[in-house]
Amino acid sequence: MAILAGPVAAEEPEWKSQYFYDKAESSLVILDFQFASAVRGIAVGFVLKGSHRQPAAVVTSDGGAHWDLTKPEDVPVSLFFLNESLGWMVAESSLWKTTEAGRSWTRVGKLPKGRILRLFFLDADHGWAVGLKKTVLETHDGGLTWTPVAAASEPPGEPAYSAYTWVAFATPRYGLIQGFNLPPRRWSPAFSSQFDPQATANYRDVPHLNYSLDTRDAGKTWKPTSASLFGDTTKIRFLPDGSGIGLIEYSQYFRLASEVFAVDWRTGKSESIYKDAQFGVTDVWKTPEGTVYLAGALAIGRVRNLVEGRVQVLMSRDNKTFRAMAVDYRATANRVILTCPDNRNVWMATDTGMILKLVAPEDAAH
């Protein structure tokens, strides 16, 4: 079990707000965030006005010195950038491609409407799209055409209650696709809580199927596996040296909020390095130099994920001792997203419309 140390010293870097959407009677919900390089970054989501959603993207081309709020043609869902310029955006009804780091987008190909959650590309042509109803699709022409990956349908469980949500490659040949099957329950804790709050407090989660597809030949073949587990593996990030970091998120009725594990793709071994009942980690990152960041929100009260909590980030250089970092006191969220184009540029976005950068003391003084 990792040890949570005290607050960092004053000379340590801290998370400073670089952009915050603050307009009356509306809010910005950020769904995904990426820096394709040290200077080019984009956050996507929607502006919420009452019950109406407007597509939104916040873009910088000068390392965060200036940000522009733009309006895509469709509500974005997620991003994938292959390099500083070339990227793709999954939207609710369409797929888009950019060669200008998100400054402009061109509609490409055709994907199942409302079904795709995330993309991953090995190069400018070869990639995968994953999503609801056990959907895994492959392209060899940059997203113009897509074909189903047959192995995705093999794990047990009704497709209507199944999804693939994450793709990660450790090398051009070795990759993973993660997913789950979560059928509805006859008894709903959320419904019951209206009449018996104590019943909800005493409710205990039950395991469900987790899916994994792995390839060792650049996606020519995929091996499907499934296992009954608590929680869902929502993030896995690899480094070329074989080390990686992964995240399991649990439901609000489980005794833990989240658990982080270290993984080695060469051996297939994994080890739990951090878990907490009140700190809901929603993203993890490991830099090339080996620093690990865990970002999320602290729960308020006994039932998690119902109200925004204070954003917290933990840092470790040895996978054993995690230290809390200073974060702008205004940062609250249900979910946060990390993006680190290199060791020196580490960024975070909240689903409440704030973008923060990890700033060294000497930089903060200017």
Image: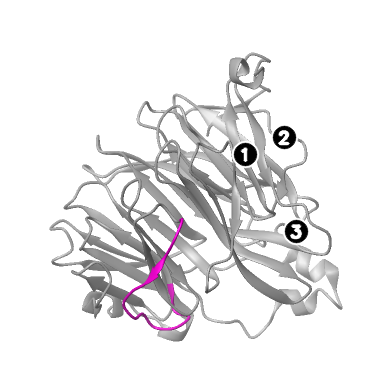
Q: How far apart are marks 2 and 1 (CA)?
A: 8 Å
> Percent position (x, y) of residue 252?
66, 61
- Foreground tag (3 vs 1): 1
Q: Which of 234 and 326 is in front in this view?
A: 326
Going by the numbered disc 2, the residue's amino acid type is Asp
Callout 2 environment at 10 Å: few (<14), some (14 to 19), or many (20+)? some
Label located before the other in sequence (3 or 1)? 3
Nearest to the observer: residue 161 or residue 125: 125
Where 156 sits versus 226, above or below? Answer: below
Q: Is residue 351 visible?
A: yes
The residue at 47%/57% (across/down) is 234
Residue at x 52% of width, y 80% of height: 183
Marks 3 and 1, how far apart in space?
27 Å
Give the Cα distance between marks 2 and 3. 25 Å
On-image quarter of the C terminus: top right
Residue type (three-letter) at the residue carrying disc 1:
Leu
Say which residue label 1 marks: 356
User: Where 76 sits versus 63, above or below?
Assistant: below
The three-letter code of the residue at mark 3 reads: Val
Tag 1's secondary structure? strand
Dot 2 or dot 3, earlier in sequence = 3
Crowd class of label 3 (few under 14; some 14 to 19; many from 20; radius 10 Å) = some
Q: Between disc 2 and disc 1, whose residue precedes?
A: 2
Q: Nearer the viewer, mark 2 or mark 3?
A: 2
Which residues, given as a range, are shown in magenta? 103-116
> Mark 2 touching mark 1, by CB under 8 A?
yes
* Residue under label 3: 303
Q: Main secondary structure of the magenta part?
A: loop
Q: Kindly identify which residue carries mark 2.
A: 328
